[in-house]
């Protein structure tokens, strides 16, 4: 049977499953939450696993767990979507999608804490802990929103880079507590809270933040990251508020 004939036969079933899922979600989600769910279902290909359970897939490497949650959020990976619930495992390769007013805290196996703000898309692309001789590396990816990272006790043992990729540049971490995300519609900011520092790089150049309380704001992928400056208390408070739990 031709491929296009098979597609025509299976398409109605896919549409029916998505419609049934949408109707069931509409019974208990507000409109903003329903929009988030629909977006996540679309990315997952229409398959949902409830209660934070793990669906089938080629790889189910657990890299951490959910330690705090506020509001509605989803984990999307390999055609499967599941709710973010307390103590749920977090898998390598998952994408976290938070809803309006939501907050999510993930604690990784090395005790690194990732806190995500509302309306955030954050991909856990790679999280290899490594060892004293190992080649472990971490690659996270911010699509939109805001986050805070406080690296854990094994940060120095990974043996590879710990980086967060963003639309305007890549943030590299050296045993640090820092905040990153959108404070303006078209700009990404980074604030060092404590620790050894971070570097920010893109195709046009690089800079470092080595003093707590200092930060940078990126406005273009084609412009080099600027020199870090001391943030005022109001700007720092705005950043922290994006990831603070009620």
Image (cartoon, grey):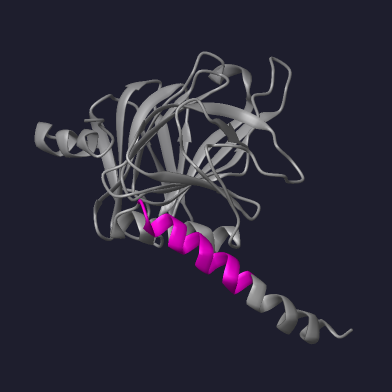
Q: Nearer the viewer, residue 109 or 205?
A: 109
**Residue 113 image position (x, y, % from top left):** 44, 25
Q: Write down the quadrant of residue 50 in the picture.
A: top right
**On the picture, is 82 further left or further right than 246?**
right
Q: Nearer the viewer, residue 148 or 46?
A: 46
Q: Write down the quadrant of residue 204 in the picture.
A: bottom left
Residue at 79% across, 86% down = 5
Whether residue 68 is situated above or below residue 13 in the rendered picture: above
Q: Mostly what secondary structure, the magenta segment?
A: helix
Q: Write down the quadrant of residue 11 in the picture.
A: bottom right
Q: Nearer the viewer, residue 163 or 209?
A: 163
Residue at 11% across, 31% down = 233
**Residue 54 image position (x, y, % from top left):** 63, 38
Q: Nearer the viewer, residue 32 or 29?
A: 29
Q: Is residue 223 visible?
A: no
Whether residue 17 is situated above or below residue 153 in the rendered picture: below
Which segment is the magenta one?
14-28
**On the picture, is 107 further left or further right than 117?**
right
Whether residue 28 is situated above or below residue 211 in the rendered picture: below
Q: Is residue 45 visible?
A: yes
**On the picture, is 220 further left or further right than 81?**
left
Inspect the magenta stretch and tell me whether residue 87 lies in it: no
Please identify the residue farthest to the right as the structure is shown. Answer: 1
**Residue 40 image position (x, y, % from top left):** 49, 57
Q: How many marks?
A: 0
> Which quarter of the figure is the C terminus placed in?
top left
Residue at 30% across, 57% down = 32
**Residue 226 image position (x, y, % from top left):** 30, 47
Residue at 69% across, 17% down = 131
């Amino acid at each position: 049977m031709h491929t296009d004939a098979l597609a025509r036969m299976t398409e109605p079933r896919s549409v029916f499953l998505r419609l049934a899922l949408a109707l069931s979600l509409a019974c208990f989600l507000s409109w903003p939450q329903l929009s988030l769910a629909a977006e996540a279902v679309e990315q997952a290909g229409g398959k949902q696993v409830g209660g934070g359970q793990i669906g089938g897939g080629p790889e189910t490497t657990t890299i951490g767990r959910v330690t705090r949650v506020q509001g509605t959020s989803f984990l999307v990976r390999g055609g499967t979507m599941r709710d973010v619930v307390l103590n749920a495992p977090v898998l390598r390769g998952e994408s976290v999608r938070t809803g309006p007013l939501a907050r999510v805290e993930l604690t990784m196996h090395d005790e690194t804490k990732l806190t995500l703000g509302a309306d955030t898309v954050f991909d856990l692309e790679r999280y290899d802990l490594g060892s004293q001789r190992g080649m472990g590396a971490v690659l996270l990816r911010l699509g939109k929103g805001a986050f805070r990272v406080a690296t854990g006790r094994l940060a120095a043992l990974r043996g590879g880079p710990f980086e967060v990729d963003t639309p305007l540049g890549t943030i590299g971490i050296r045993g640090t507590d820092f905040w990153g995300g959108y404070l303006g519609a078209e700009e990404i900011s980074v604030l060092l809270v404590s620790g050894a520092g971070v570097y920010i790089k893109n195709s046009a150049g690089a800079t470092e933040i080595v003093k707590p309380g200092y930060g940078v704001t990126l406005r273009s992928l084609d412009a080099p990251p600027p020199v870090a400056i001391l943030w005022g208390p109001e700007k720092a408070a705005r950043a922290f508020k994006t990831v603070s739990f009620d």
